[in-house]
Image (cartoon, rainbow, N blue to C red):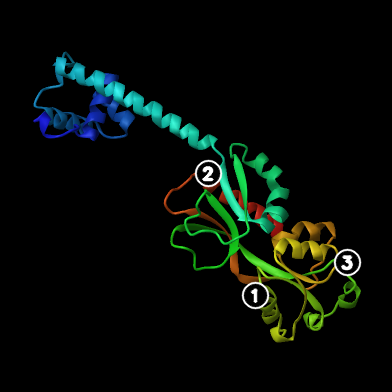
Amino acid sequence: MPGTRDLPPLNALRAFEATSRLASVTAAAKELHVTHGAVSRQIRALEGALGQPLFVRQGRGLALTATGQQLRDSAGEAFAQLRDTWARLGRAASERPLVLGCPGSLLARWMIPRLERLRRDLPELRLHLSAQESAFEPGLRGLDAALLLAEPPWPGEWLVQELAPERIGPVLSPQCPAAARLQGRPPEALVGEPLLHTASRPQAWPQWAHAAGVAPGALRYGQGFEHLYYLLEAAVAGLGVAIAPQQLVADDLAAGRLRAPWGFMDTPASWVLATPRRVHDGRTDALAGWLREALDDSAG
């Protein structure tokens, strides 16, 4: 009986609403991407739950009963309101900025110089950039996505798309006093040089030394910096040899502000785009594709 449940079967109601609006079971089936028989069964189920017929045969077509007319008016209004609300919510989601968090060094040295290209390639994407100087929260509170250089394991609350491998190597300015002395020398020539370093990536120099066949314990460290951005600015200023991710110095290498005498090597880390597992924003898929292409260009 109708009074035994608060709402009619919603799939059946959807089939009825489409049939009554389009005046055709065939047209309703086409709109709902189901078979003619599936719509007919849903309508029969609705009539069975209600205990009254909703349609009667009229010639080769269907006509609504008085009960059917009442349900059509109510269901039509409800579904129209749902469609309007859904469309409005969809527009609101697409119009609000996508909030992307990334460490300040990545933001300043890589992301900002490519914003014009991003706007040109993805004109529909409104992006709000948020500099993050501390570790990202597992829930990425306040962010729709995070761009970072990191290595697994990832927080369980994240969905992670790997974009590009991290590659690091020593870099120095042609104006650095050590540049002429190190020209054409093997990696071992860095032993004894006061190396610029950063507290945010203490593992970088030892990783490179191990891969290059240099004893990490033989390295000597000079001026330290709190953030990678300042480390790289010091290298550009000719203050010494720094260790750098390849993409972050790509523009400086292309412009001749820095040199990478020994090239770059892979590390266990990657450039990744992390999103909260609790919700999927389709705009991040387009952003991930763009980031992969731009990072690949930077590594060329």
- At 80% across and 80% down in the image, what residue appears? 190
Which disc is residue 64 wearing? none
Mark 1 is on which residue type? Gln
**Tag 1 secondary structure:** loop
Which is closer to the viewer, label 1 or label 3? Answer: 1
Residue count near mark 3 (Cα–Cα under 10 Å), binned few <14, some 14–19, many ≥20:
some
Image quadrant in which you'd find residue 78: top left
- At 47% across and 56% down in the image, what residue appears? 139
Residue count near mark 2 (Cα–Cα under 10 Å), binned few <14, some 14–19, many ≥20:
some
**Tag 2 secondary structure:** helix
Is residue 291 or residue 144 the one in the foreground?
A: 144
Which disc is residue 203 wearing? 1
- Mark 3 → mark 2, Cα distance in angstroms: 42 Å
- Indicate the position of residue 214 as horizontal and vertical percent values: 72, 84
Q: Are marks 1 and 2 in contact (CB under 8 Å)?
A: no
Left or right: where does residue 29 sit relative to residue 285? left
Of the 4 image quadrants, the one containing the N terminus is top left
Left or right: where does residue 207 sit relative to residue 260? left
Q: Is residue 62 visible?
A: no
**Tag 3 secondary structure:** loop
Residue identifier under label 2: 283
- Indicate the position of residue 38 as horizontal and vertical percent values: 22, 34
Is residue 239 or residue 56 the one in the foreground?
A: 239
Q: Earlier in the sequence, mark 1 or mark 2?
A: 1
Left or right: where does residue 257 sit relative to residue 283? right
Image quadrant in which you'd find residue 31: top left
Residue identifier under label 3: 174
Mark 2 is on which residue type? Arg
Q: Are marks 1 and 3 in contact (CB under 8 Å)?
A: no
- Mark 1 → mark 2, Cα distance in angstroms: 34 Å
Q: Is residue 50 visible?
A: yes
- At 70% across and 60% down in the image, what residue appears? 247
